[in-house]
Amino acid sequence: MTTTVTVRVPAKVNVQLAVGAARPDGFHDLANVFLAVGLYDEVTATPADTLRITAEGHDVDRVPLDRTNLAARAAELLAARYGRSPDVHLHITKDIPVAGGMAGGSADAAGALLACDALWSTGASRDELLDLCAELGSDVPFSLVGGAALGRGRGELLTPLPVGGAFHWVFAVADGGLSTPAVYREFDRLTEDTDVPEPEAAPELLAALASGDATALAATLTNDLQPAALSLRPSLAATLGAGTAAGALASLVSGSGPTTAFLVKDAESARSVSAALLASGTCRAVRVADAPAAGATVL
C-alpha cells in the first residue's frame, strides 16, 4: 500500500456566473463558466488510526480542523462508498484564499477524494469520483476536472470548454471572508420583486475563451452575485475601482467574494496592476496567476 499521496488542486474564477431564481430546494440553477487558475492547495493523505486534519499556509487559522472540513467529509464519503473506515491523516497546505470565492474548500475536498482513492487503492472511476464530488458541493466537481467548463444545474453538471490561450489574472484578497449562503440570500432579497431570467452561457464569452482573446473576454465577464457581494461588503467597490484605474482590462468579484479578480493583458500588466492594488490600501494581499490550470493532480 502507498504510504503517502499528495494531490495538487487549483483555485477557480467564474468568468460568467449567471444565477436563476431560487428553486424549491433552496438551490439556484446556474450557468457557471469556470476557469481554473494557477493558485494551488495541496492535500497529503497518510495512513492513520483515525481521521485527522492538519493545515499550514495562508489563513489557516480560519480553516476548520474537525469533521466539518469538506476534505474530511470527502474522506468519509469515499470510505463509506467502499465499506472501509476513514482512517487517514489529511494535511492541507493552503495557498488559495480562504472563504474568498475561489473554491478553496471545494478544491481541498476534490484533492482529498483523489488522494484517498490512491492511498486506499479503491479504484474508483472518474465518473464515480465526480458523483462523489457532486454530493460534496456544487464547485467540487470542477476542482477535480480543472481547465475550463460550463457548470449547469447548481454548477455540478460540467461540460468542458476549449481555451485558445493563456489568460493573466490578478486577485485582490480582502480582509475576512464572505459566506456563500449569505451572498445567495442577499441575491434573493435584491431580486425578489424582479423576473429573474433563466441562466444561459453567453455565446460571445465562450467564443472569447476559445479564441484566447483577453480583450474580448474582458468585455463579456459577468457575475450575477456581484451586486449581492457588494451589498454585504461595500468596500469591495473601492478595490474594483483601484484595479480598473491601474489598467486592468476588466474587474469583477470572484464567485461569492470577497476576493476580487482582475483580467489583465499580459505578465507586465499583472505586475503593475498588483503593485497599484497593494499601494491603494483597498486589499490585504494580491496574487498573480495564469489560466487555465490543470485539475486535481497526484504529485
Image (cartoon, grey):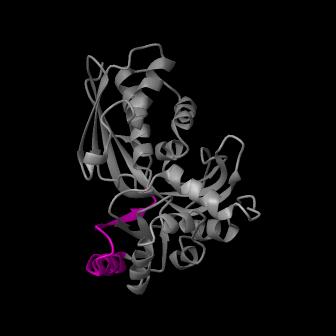
Please determine whether, in this image, residue 198 is positioned above or below residue 250.
above
Query: Which quadrant of the figure has residue 213?
Result: bottom right
Mark yes or no: residue 18 visible: no
Residue lying farthest to the top in this orientation: 83
Mark yes or no: residue 57 visible: yes
Q: Nearer the viewer, residue 191 or 55?
A: 191
Q: Quadrant of the C terminus?
A: top left
- 24 on left or right of 114: right
- 226 on left or right of 90: right
Image x and y of residue 271, in percent: 30, 77
Q: Is residue 2 magenta?
A: no
- Residue at (60, 56) in percent of width and height: 32
Query: Which quadrant of the figure has residue 283?
Result: bottom left
Q: Quadrant of the N terminus?
A: top left
How many numbered dots are placed on residues in this image?
0
Image x and y of residue 202, in percent: 68, 66
Segment colored magenta = 267-293
Image x and y of residue 92, in percent: 29, 40
Please determine whether, in this image, residue 74 is positioned above or below residue 158.
above
Image x and y of residue 20, in percent: 69, 56
- 52 on left or right of 249: left
Q: Is residue 275 magenta?
A: yes
Please determine whether, in this image, residue 157 is positioned above or below residue 272.
above
- Residue at (72, 42) in percent of width and height: 24
- Residue at (77, 63) in percent of width and height: 195
